[in-house]
Image (spheres, helix red, strand yellow):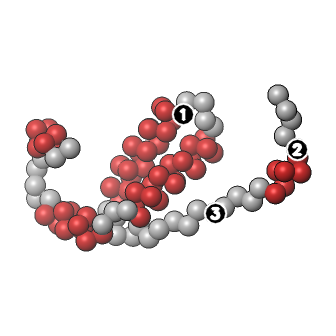
Amino acid sequence: MEKLNPELLKEIKPKKLDMVDDSFVYPEDKKELLKQLKELYTKKYEWADDKLVTCMVSWHYNETIKNLNKEIYLEEKKENVNDEMNIEDFLKNV
């Protein structure tokens, strides 16, 4: 296997991830999304170290929030405040 030239590594500049505004997302939804993403990546990429998993989870979280329609999300949250959901209802909406 060919050795990586150390000079090439100096050229690699990590790009900072610009996080989107997630202030409108309810704290419990943020927590659940991050929990699910972390579980997904730690199981799918068992070989990955914590730093790589953190990068993947951060990127996926950011993309999810970026593509979330704020108005629809907030409207659904408002509508579901008093709704109780059972398993059948949940699976029907999947």
Residue type, label 1: Tyr
Q: Are marks 3 and 2 in contact (CB under 8 Å)?
A: no
Residue ID at (88%, 46%) = 6
| Of pointers 1 and 2, the one earlier in the residue sequence | 2
Horizontal and vertical percent position of residue 8: 84, 51
Position above or below: 93 against 26: above
Q: Which residue is mark 3?
A: 16
Residue ID at (88%, 44%) = 5
CA distance separating discs 3 and 2: 24 Å
Number of other residues with Cα within 10 Å of mark 1, as a class: few under 14, some 14 to 19, many 20 or more: few
Q: Are marks 1 and 2 in contact (CB under 8 Å)?
A: no
Secondary structure under the numbered disc 3 in the rendered image = loop
Residue type, label 2: Asn
Residue ID at (45%, 58%) = 63
Residue ID at (58%, 50%) = 55
Q: How many numbered discs?
A: 3
Quadrant in the picture for residue 2: top right
Quadrant in the picture for residue 75: bottom left
Quadrant in the picture for residue 12: bottom right
Position above or below: 40 against 22: above
Q: Which residue is mark 2?
A: 5
Secondary structure under the numbered disc 2 in the rendered image = loop
| Of pointers 3 and 2, the one earlier in the residue sequence | 2
Residue type, label 3: Lys
Q: Nearer the viewer, residue 76 or 9?
A: 9
Number of other residues with Cα within 10 Å of mark 2, as a class: few under 14, some 14 to 19, many 20 or more: few
Q: Which residue is mark 1?
A: 45
Residue 34, disc: none
CA distance separating discs 1 and 2: 27 Å
